[in-house]
Amino acid sequence: MNDLFIQSISIDWEKIKRGSYLRKLKAIRRLKTLVFQNPVTFFVGENGTGKSTLLEALAIASGFNPEGGTKNYSFSTYDSHSELWRALRLGRGFQRENWGYFLRAESFYNVATKEEDYSDFLHPSKRYHEKSHGESFLALVQDQFRSNGLYFLDEPEAALSPQRQLALLAEIWRCVKEESQFIIATHSPILLGLPGAQILTFDSGTVRPCAYEETGSYQVTEMFLNHRERILKELLEE
């Protein structure tokens, strides 16, 4: 085995209700075990394939609040997470992380609000709401990403320009060199270019490894950049 904080997962399908929508997600319903091989693992695939569902379950099973934040966050704005986390068994390494964060693009506003509620004299608020969406995202990353950390990121590129995505990539790389582990669901061809990352695609009805150039994010972006006029003509003509 490796020295990652989370080395593998297994799913006990007996704990999932027969009528659960999880059994309708092809890639998820066929998943029994999964081994993490690198400090950074990317989940890729079309919308609705289950990548964010699995990421969310991993984060909750690891002790994080379903809507995001550190392990110290405990609140609920809207209970929408699946039962998958209850069926997950985490294969842990001997080492334990010193810090961690679950970043969800869709609930970042709620987490930023809660950060202000949790602040006090000794822990002043970072006042993320006073920054633009993209600036607050990157500020949070710079505040919360530390060495020996365990991080779950769900579509972190959502609020970031291409330049800021490069900045995020650099922050991830810095933390990886300081013994951190990341599991990330993304559509960003920029983030997916991180050297040495494990890329798992959900698109084929199974969760399987794939090369960077095999990802839909790369292929669609590359095709558009190289054949923009032809694609727009075909797409937009009546």
Image: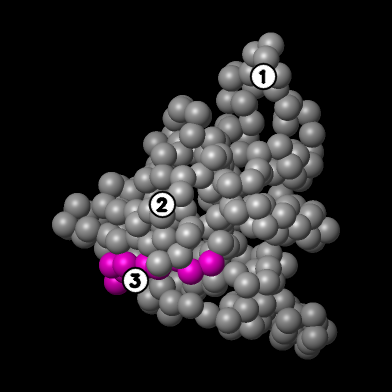
Q: Residues within 10 Å of mark 2 (few under 14, many from 20)?
A: few
Q: Residue at x 67, y 57 (%)?
A: 177
Look at the image and say whether residue 34 sits in the magenta stretch. Answer: yes
SS assignment for the magenta stretch, majority: loop
Q: Residues within 10 Å of mark 1 (few under 14, many from 20)?
A: few
Residue of label 2? 94
Start-end of magenta stretch: 30-38
Q: Nearer the viewer, mark 1 or mark 3?
A: 1
Residue 92 seen by the camera: yes
Q: Residue at x 73, y 81 (%)?
A: 222
Q: Residue at x 78, y 28 (%)?
A: 130
How far apart are the two marked residues, 3 and 2, measured between alpha carbons? 33 Å
Q: Residue at x 64, y 83 (%)?
A: 213
Q: Quadrant of residue 103?
A: top right
Q: Position of residue 27 (x, y in %)?
A: 37, 70
Q: Nearer the viewer, mark 2 or mark 1?
A: 2
Q: Is residue 71 or residue 75 the one in the foreground?
A: 71
The numbered dot on residue 192 is none
**Along the horizontal axis of the image, is 132 left or right of 173?**
right
Q: As shown in the figure, which amino acid type bears the numbered disc 3?
A: Lys
Q: Nearer the viewer, mark 3 or mark 2?
A: 2
How far apart are the two marked residues, 2 and 1, measured between alpha carbons? 31 Å
Look at the image and say whether residue 168 sits in the magenta stretch. Answer: no
Q: Position of residue 229 (x, y in %)?
A: 82, 84
Quarter in which the N terminus is drawn: bottom left
Residue of label 3? 26
Compare marks 3 and 2 and give the one earlier in the sequence: 3
Q: Is residue 52 or residue 78 the one in the foreground?
A: 52
**Along the horizontal axis of the image, is 49 left or right of 191?**
left
Residue of label 1? 123
Q: As shown in the figure, which amino acid type bears the numbered disc 1?
A: His
Quarter in which the C terminus is drawn: bottom right
